[in-house]
Amino acid sequence: MVSAAEGNERNFRAGLSRTRGAYLALRDRISRGEFRPGMRFPGEPTLAAELGVSRVTLRHALDRLEAEGLVERRMGSGTYLSARGGGSPVVADLANVLTHLVEMGRRTSVKLLSFAYLAPSPDIRTALQLPEGERVQRSERVRLIDGQPFSYLVTSVPESIGIGWSEDDLAKRPLLELLERAGLVADHARQTIAAALAGPDVARALGIEPGAALLTLTRTVFDPQGRGIEHLQALYRPDLYSFQMDLVRAGHREGRRWRPVAVDGTKPGNNRPPQAAE
């Protein structure tokens, strides 16, 4: 037999699920371009019927969209897609990673959340090829575009390198710029891309719900001698950030395959991208 408290809890969770479903359905329609910036949404009765939810549930979903700056609620007029709601996400060129970081550093701002020296995890120690006992400078930052947080960055740098700058430096300057200032060259990198769910701390920093889907990028940067100089774990909101790779067919006959090219048309490895921001 279900107690009254358990029944209330189930109803509460069901309400959250319906609200999230309506919210996601509206986000999907916005991302598909069904609404243009400044365009009025259908009235609440029509929209609620289209989504198969109550008007109360619909209002909760619209509240979330408004909190994210995607829609504007105008008293006596209705709900409209905001200018930001119709905007395009930041697009990263996978074939020209470091050059992309330079441009992103110019377009965005960073908020430093934490800064400390500590023992690295086994995975980070292996990635950076650190000797036993060496610590790393670990920082957590949020990157914003137009004041909207879109990425959560956790960077680890060998302590012997990180002592070259202060916490204040890292709060004001891109990490790759600080590496360059220290006389280091970001020569090449190894990275993997996957997906993850937002934990409570990340969700709070990015202004999203716990459990929301995120893009993840793990990158280790090396100098010309192959020494690991930076490890980055980045979590991105997929509504505000995406990855792009341009490809060209290469080879002959049965050996033909897709090869990545940089946005400017140069093949990776044929040019040395400039060192600067992340």
Image (cartoon, rainbow, N blue to C red):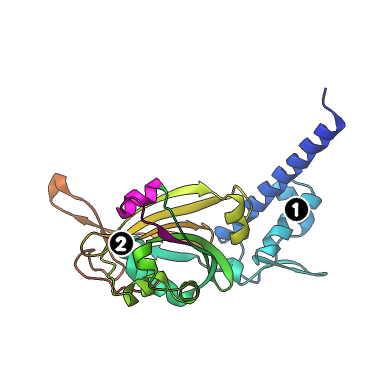
Percent from the top left, x then y, of residue 45?
79, 54
Q: Which residues are magenta?
A: 122-140
Residue at image x 65%, y 63%? 68
Q: Say what amino acid the circle numbered 1 marks.
A: Leu
Camera-nearest residue between 169 and 52: 169
Q: What is the crowding at mark 1: few (fewer than 14 residues within 10 Å), some, or many (at least 20)?
A: many
Q: Is residue 130 magenta?
A: yes
Percent from the top left, x then y, of residue 218?
40, 54
Q: Say what amino acid the circle numbered 2 marks.
A: Ala
- Which quadrant does the N terminus fall into? top right
Q: Is residue 140 visible?
A: no
- The image quadrant that residue 36 belongs to is bottom right
The furthest residue to the top: 1
Residue under label 1:
58
Q: Is residue 100 visible?
A: yes
With respect to residue 122, does 7 lie above or below? above
